[in-house]
Image (cartoon, rainbow, N blue to C red):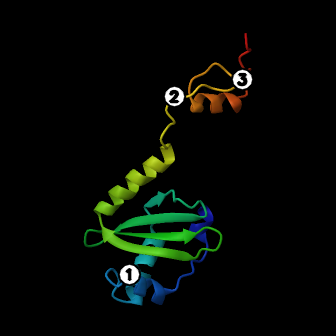
């Protein structure tokens, strides 16, 4: 992701302005939001697509801007300017994506007498000695 911040970004300002006319009055408005985020990004989020990074920053007038950028090309594929509450939503989503929801321990392991898929998976990939069957 560090390359995303150093490299040039590519964007079709006209297309982004047309995509969200309720957020952006002109191509110049889109450019200002992108420039402000790029000059001083404050939030980096995990995205559903690992090939895309999501960067956000609080803006003036109780707004937050966020952009989605393809990591390999630096192409901006999405831009938003929304209420500050959206930053809270992005933080909650990010936390959920980073921690995930553990699998409940309801099934028996195949190779060990252990309950739950998580424990079975962790034993399979462990470097520790595996328990012997008796």
Residues at discs 3 and 2 in contact (Cβ within 8 Å): no
> In the image, 124: left or right of 45?
right
Which of the two residues, 99 or 13, is positioned nearer the viewer here?
99
Question: Which element is circle 1 on?
Answer: loop
Residues at discs 2 and 1 in contact (Cβ within 8 Å): no
Residue 81's place in the image compared with 17, above or below, is above
Q: Where residue 100 sits: x, y (%)?
A: 49, 44
Identify the residue under disc 3.
128
**C-alpha distance separating marks 3 and 2:** 24 Å
Q: Residue at x 35, y 57 (%)?
A: 89
Identify the residue under disc 1.
20
Of marks 2 and 1, which one's residue comes earlier in the chain?
A: 1
> In the image, 117: left or right of 57?
right
Image quadrant in which the N terminus is located:
bottom right
Q: Where residue 79 sits: x, y (%)?
A: 44, 75
Of marks 3 and 1, which one's residue comes earlier in the chain?
A: 1
Q: Where residue 28 sits: x, y (%)?
A: 40, 88
- Foreground label between 2 and 1: 2
> In the image, 60: left or right of 26?
left
Asked where in the image residue 90 lies, by quadrant, the reply is bottom left
Q: Residue at x 59, y 59 (%)?
A: 50
Q: Residue at x 51, y 36 (%)?
A: 103
Q: Residue at x 72, y 23 (%)?
A: 128
Residue 28's place in the image compared with 4, above or below, is below
Q: Which mark is residue 106?
A: 2
Asked where in the image residue 123 lies, by quadrant, the reply is top right
């Amino acid at each position: 992701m560090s390359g995303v911040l150093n490299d040039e970004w590519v964007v079709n300002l006209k297309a982004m302005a047309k995509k969200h006319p309720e957020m952006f009055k002109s191509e110049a408005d889109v450019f200002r939001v992108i420039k402000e985020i790029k000059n001083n990004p404050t939030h980096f989020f995990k995205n559903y697509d690992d090939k895309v990074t999501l960067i956000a920053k609080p803006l003036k007038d109780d707004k937050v801007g966020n952009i989605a950028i393809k990591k390999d090309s630096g192409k901006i594929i999405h831009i938003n300017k929304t209420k500050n509450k959206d930053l809270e939503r992005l933080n909650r989503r990010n936390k959920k994506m980073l921690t995930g929801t553990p699998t409940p321990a309801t099934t028996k392991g195949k190779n060990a007498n252990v309950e739950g898929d998580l424990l079975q998976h962790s034993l399979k990939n462990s470097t520790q000695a595996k328990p012997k069957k008796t």
